[in-house]
Amino acid sequence: MRSNRGAGPVSIGDELLMKRDTTIRIFSLFIALAVVVPAVQAALTVDAGGDRTVLAGEPVTILAACNDTDIFDAMNLSACVNWSTGRTEAEIVQDDEQNGTVRATHTYLAAGTYTVTVEVANNATGAVACDTLNVTVGPQTAEVKVAPKVLNQKSNGVMTVFISIADWLGFTGADSANTTVSDPSEFAIGNATPEKVNFCAKDGGTLILKYRRQDLDLAAGDGNLTVTGGAVTENGSVPVVGTGSVSVINPGNGNAAKFGSDDGHARAAMVKEKVKNQKEFREEQQKSNGKAKGQAP
């Protein structure tokens, strides 16, 4: 029989039993840790790319790179894009064993800056990855010419604006067959709208808009006039903007009584400028009407 362990020295057999118990405890701890600590899940990432700038009515295409540290299985992945104006499903194309490309296209009709979010989900593991970029949308641009180029702030005459629509009548994604000018009277300069609107078929089309100068609220020193309007495409109406250079002066109203003895040169300069403006106006009209001869309006 074994002697009492507490009453005497520990025997060799007792030491072996103690070491075996310790080994069993450590092994049990390893098993417990293996059960408690979960396996590391494969990482899924997506890169939406850099910010974009487009014009209203032009399609913007997102090509987002996605990566999975696990074997890339396009069958288990799904993607969508939130364009800020709506949400659409996106196509995923596998590039190699770990990488793929998310592709989606959208068209904005209104100018502004939009936050776009690309989301990719692994339906097998439940992993989800997101990334964002900004898309800045500007209005379509139109070439604008103003006649006369020098305006007297106190005059009550008519200013004519020539808008070439050829540049934006056939912008990307549309052509002259499915893009038309919205109501030309909506082309405004500030709060002023034209009193008269004509159309010339020269070089793809020119709008001739006549504004009353007193409606324009011009200030001496102004150098540019911004004309805003719109075009109707197959997708909807898009904004159009053009800028024309003009010099606004304030030499007086032209009455002799208003001029002193020292103002003779100023009055003569104003008369000379008026003649020059009339000449430029006639030349601009001749250019607009000359090539339109024999063409359908």
Image: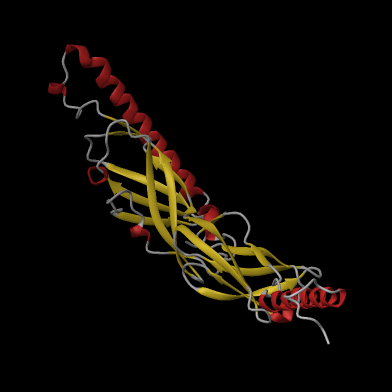
Is 13 situated left or right of 147 in this image?
A: right
Measured from the top left, where is residue 5 in percent x and y? 76, 77
Please tell me in which quadrant of the rendered image residue 101 appears.
bottom right
Q: Which residue occupies 82% across, 84% down? A: 2
26 in relation to 140, above or below: below
Q: Which residue occupies 77% across, 73% down? A: 8
Please say which color scheme the image uses.
secondary structure
Is 157 situated left or right of 4 in this image?
A: left
> Quick one: 69 or 37, which is closer to the camera?
37
Please tell me in which quadrant of the rendered image residue 93 appears.
bottom right
Measured from the top left, where is residue 191 in percent x and y? 27, 51
Outermost residue on the left side: it is: 257
Question: Where does the N terminus fall, quadrant-wise?
Answer: bottom right
> Quick one: 145 or 294, which is closer to the camera?
145
Q: Which residue occupies 62% across, 70% down? A: 104
- Could you tell me if residue 294 is visible in this image? no
Please tell me in which quadrant of the rendered image residue 39 appears.
bottom right
Outermost residue on the top side: it is: 261
Q: How many marks?
A: 0
150 in relation to 74, above or below: above
- Could you tell me if residue 69 is visible in this image? yes
Outermost residue on the bottom side: it is: 1
Is 10 situated left or right of 191 in this image?
A: right
46 in relation to 268, above or below: below
Measured from the top left, where is residue 40 in percent x and y? 70, 71
